[in-house]
Amino acid sequence: MWRLWQKSAIVRRSSGQLVPCRLSGRPFSGASKPQIPPQLSDYLQSKLSKHKFVDRDRFYATVLKHLEPIHGSTMTVEQLQSFSGLDSLADAVARDFHDSTEEKIPVVFVLPHSTAKVKLSFYQHATLLETSQQDRIVAEFLEGSCGGNASCSSCHVYIDDNSTAQLTQPSKAEKDMLDCAFEVQDNSRLACQVRWIGSDDDHSQSSKKRQKLIVHIPTGVNDMWK
């Protein structure tokens, strides 16, 4: 569990004045919200907008906590701007946040040219392509050359008929791109467009446990592995 010990933070107003602030000393999962200086919060929100959290303040406070060994207990917007590893740090904190708080289901990737299977966690915030990046081998098969914009077919997969997970439906753009995919089938999808939408019934926990996802990677998904 992350802990946010009481530390002073200093932010710089537009006038140049240094203003001391404090972060609350509370557990990451506690009920009290850490008090993030507005200037720091605004900057982090502008840089880390891809991380959509219900408890955004606690996420930001954890990022700042990990920067204390570098900048000490005093933190300025200028120091955040000069830290080139902010995105990587935020990604690491986000993974821990998702592991402890967000709903997930298991997904099994069946690799081509073998009977090997890789089991990963499929979170609601992520696409199937992003999920594949959790494992180095799976990531090598699913390139996602276009960056996840449904503009190529290098993340083409087959959704196993035995899968019971509730997934997003393919858009027209995805269907059009699948026409260019290698050995397309009725169960073909672009991994960059597939998300798990969770359960919408009154027994979400039991329903979630029944959901599973099995994904087959085609043999010709990219030139390297044909």
Image (cartoon, rainbow, N blue to C red):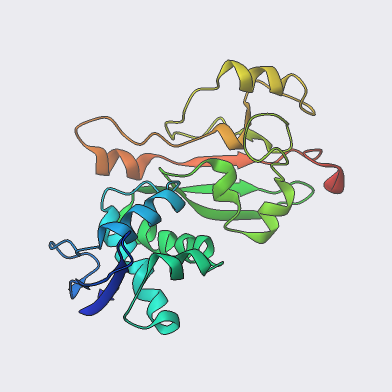
Q: Is residue 225 above or below residue 77?
A: above
Work out whether residue 1 can be spotted: no
- Quadrant of res 144: top right
Q: In this view, does 75 lie above or below 150?
A: below
Work out whether residue 147 can be spotted: yes
Residue under the image location 36 percent in, 41 percent down: 210
Quadrant where the image shows the N terminus? bottom left
- Quadrant of res 197: top left
Q: In this view, does 200 lie above or below 139?
A: above
Nearest the camera: 132 or 83?
83
Nearest the camera: 87 or 103?
87
Nearest the camera: 135 or 25?
25
* Residue 139 pos. (x, y %): 67, 53
Report the number of numbered marks.
Answer: 0
- Using residue 129 as the reference point, say whether residue 155 is left or right of it: right
Residue under the image location 29 percent in, 53 percent down: 56
Q: In this view, does 217 lie above or below 14?
A: above
Residue under the image location 55 percent in, 42 percent down: 128
Nearest the camera: 33 or 104?
33
- Residue, far front: 15
* Residue 116 pos. (x, y %): 68, 55
- Using residue 196 as the reference point, say whether residue 203 is left or right of it: left
* Residue 10 pos. (x, y %): 29, 73
- Using residue 18 as the reference point, say whether residue 137 is left or right of it: right
* Residue 137 pos. (x, y %): 70, 58
Quadrant where the image shows the C terminus? top right
- Residue, far left: 32
